[in-house]
Amino acid sequence: MLRNYLHIALRNLLKKKGFTFINISGLAIGMTCVILISLYVKNELSYDRSFNDSDRIFRVNINGKMGAEEFYAGYTPPTAGSALLRNFPEVESFARIYRPGEKVIRYKKGGDDRLFTEKGIFGVDSNFFEVLNYPLKQGDQATCLRELNSIVISEEIAKKYFGDADPLGKELLYDVDGYPFVVTGVLAKQTNPVSLQFDVVMPVNNFRDVHRFSWSWVWLNMATYVKLKKNVPADAAAIARLEAKFPAMMKVEAVSAFARIGQPYEEFLKKGGKWDLHLQPLKDIHLRSGAVQSGVTDQGDIKYVYIFSLVALFVVLLACVNFMNLSTAQSAKRAREVGVRKVLGSARKQLIGQFLAEAFLFSVIASAIALIAVKLTLPWFNQLAGKSLVFSSFFTNGTWLILVLLILFSGFVAGSYPAFVLTSFNPVTVLKGTGLPGGHRGSRNLRSGLVVFQFTVSTALIICTMVVYNQLHYAQHRDLGLTKENVIVIANSKRLGESEKAFRNEVAQLPQVLNASITTGVPTKDAFGDFYVPIAGDEDKQVAKDLTLNSYMADDDFISSMGLKLVAGRAFSKEFKDSASIILNETAVKQIGWKKPLGQLIRYPGGHMESYKVIGIVRDFNVESLHYAVTPFALFHTSSHTYDIRSSYVVVRVAPGDPSHVVKALQDKWRVFSPATPFDYSFLDTDFDMLYRADQRIGAVFGTFTGLSIFVACLGLFALVAFTAEQRTKEIGIRKVLGSSVSGIVRLLSKDFIVLVVIAIVIASPLAWWAMHYWLQDFTYRVTIGWWVFAGAAAVAVFIALLTVSFQAVKAAMANPVRSLRNE
């Protein structure tokens, strides 16, 4: 019986080539989307699952509040890990991570001198690979970081510096001082997705900042991971009970540290301060860290997993709806077939089996085409989504079952209408031609509902895509409080040592250069955060509040080079000794509560209780993406030396125009001062764009699937117009004989469908508004969803519908009426 079903199904497929092509192409597109998104979702859900004991590993986060500034971050003080280990027997071990920024690493052997700027450098505790067991290609996880001068590198780094030679035991020189490190391990190529990605690791005790603030509970520049003991429950309730003990520990552990900075911990809490530690499961870090600030981990967002999964489901449903619409378009002919077979004795269940067999055959063929399409398009999709997905992974860990379920689902849904509706009609009335299916109200309502569903989904996706791209455009063109265009950022200027200022002066003399400045950080990278205490005068003593400040150390030309706007006071100047001066942004002044900030003092309690006089106020400027609000910010002078300089940059503002000539001139100057150091530069506007790379990828993927859904929906609309034209062939013929024009007939066939599309727009608009309103909450600074978005999406949907309908309507209107009437 099954063989007979398949034989007849195959014959029908070959007989109706147009019907077959549209059905299979629609289903194949839908299945391709599902498989690609399944690979994407599988990858997102697999982050950090490959570590041993991943269920027992947690990142320590901090929920802090100083003054009016509240934050939630994946950073901790250097003391947090040891305090948790010391106070709680549930904790087995901890490991800390410090990110020093971009550094130059050099390999020197005879005449073979290789040096590169490396960005993925971590300083870690010696037991790092025991807490997080990254696989090593060479070396011992337990001992590779035991010595202070040991260094572990990735395979790519080993290849870059040593070629095919064995890297173990070889010496690499680190940063300006050229401190020698011996390679003690090589990381194996990471095949499983992880949230912590790096190329170089070395013992954290090599970094002076970590030593200097080893006592601190307010220096938040390290990430801490803890592993719980095997017998400790790691479920949410048990972790909540453990976290409930942390405040009591903090009142003991943090007292001396807060007292050292002149801030009694109990008083800090009474003033509304907050300094709470929390444990976040390792497996949740990648997808459930939307509110957690971190510059160490690769963080995604679980809502995109839900969104893309929903989009994939909708695209498949649209393809199945097409099958049903095409079945109704062919229903008149197939109904007679059903009538004849019923008269000849076929049972209804046999006819149902026949139609379902055809649908499943369509689904199987479409799935085979979809697999080929996925294989061919996966490199493009990887580039679009910023992933490294592998086609073979679809057939591992039961993921292939998705394809089996997809075949069964699409086959049943797509074949349900012809199987259960066409087989229900009375064969006598069908053979007389008086009861052809498709003409009664129930069928018309079903088809209308399917069209409304298709265009509701498509219009909603159009609206969402427009909002996403509008937000990205806003982020790229919003006034950031600085001028990011025509600014070149030269990294590693610390490498120049005593010649850094001379290099800056030489650069400033170049014809196309307007300003040049030295700074320890630039917007998008290397801001330094710490705790500060305002020293208020009598007038402001009651309102001045302590706060955390992010800061740069900058020279006299930084404000003009970055295009910052002074709203009060002055900038740093060579005419003054500004080593004890500070410039604040408006947000810092507002949070402190000063009415007259100029001339006030602010103390940095982290070192020698240095005090700084406020000499200027700059307009707020963004140093991070628009996902985050502007925070209190300060500029110190490069001569202040409030902390050891981790990094240094030369910022160069150039005249508008082709920058290639000035880049070449800058490179030539650099080679004069430091011929052995790579010239590493970027454009500030490009650096800002990189902050939205993940959002841009999401927008590109979303836009692609939106386009595919629209195409699939148009196939369904095309099918329905074909059905209508078939049902009204004789009416069209009579109207033409009586003098109707082609345009009149096109309007006749189009108006009902346009009404359905308008209904779909009305339904889709509030749904899309709600979804995008929710998405935009991730941005502190965001666009409003204006009426023009809905008007634009409606215009696009109506235009696409008209284009699709008109093609088939014109074809029907141009047909010879004699031929259609002769059949009567």
Image (spheres, rainbow, N blue to C red):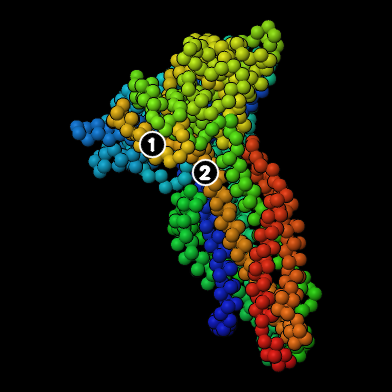
| Residue type at the position of mark 2 | Arg
Q: Position of residue 370 (x, y in %)?
A: 51, 65
Q: Which mark sits nearer the N-terminus, 1 or 2?
A: 1
Q: Which mark is residue 242?
A: none
> Residues at badges 1 and 2 in contact (C-beta under 8 Å)?
no
Instruction: Answer above or below: position of 321 versus 735.
Output: above
Q: Which residue, given by chain and number where applicable, does mark 2 sit on?
A: 693
Residue at horizontal 62 percent and vertical 16 percent from the top: 546
Q: Position of residue 682 (x, y in %)?
A: 43, 36
Residue at horizontal 45 percent and vertical 61 percent from the top: 375
Q: Position of residue 398 (x, y in %)?
A: 51, 57
Q: Does any portion of residue 343 appear in the rendered image?
A: no
637 left or right of 536 in image: left
Q: Nearer the viewer, residue 501 or 333?
A: 501
- Residue count near mark 1 (Cα–Cα under 10 Å), binned few <14, some 14–19, many ≥20: some
| Residue type at the position of mark 1 | Val
Residue at horizontal 71 percent and vertical 54 percent from the top: 791
Q: Position of residue 388 (x, y in %)?
A: 45, 50
564 left or right of 143 in image: right
Instruction: Answer above or below: position of 533 versus 163.
Output: above
- The quarter of the picture where the N terminus appears is bottom right
Identify the secondary structure beneath mark 1. helix
Q: Which residue, given by chain and number where applicable, does mark 1 sit on?
A: 663
Residue at horizontal 67 percent and vertical 63 percent from the top: 799
- Residue count near mark 2 (Cα–Cα under 10 Å), binned few <14, some 14–19, many ≥20: some
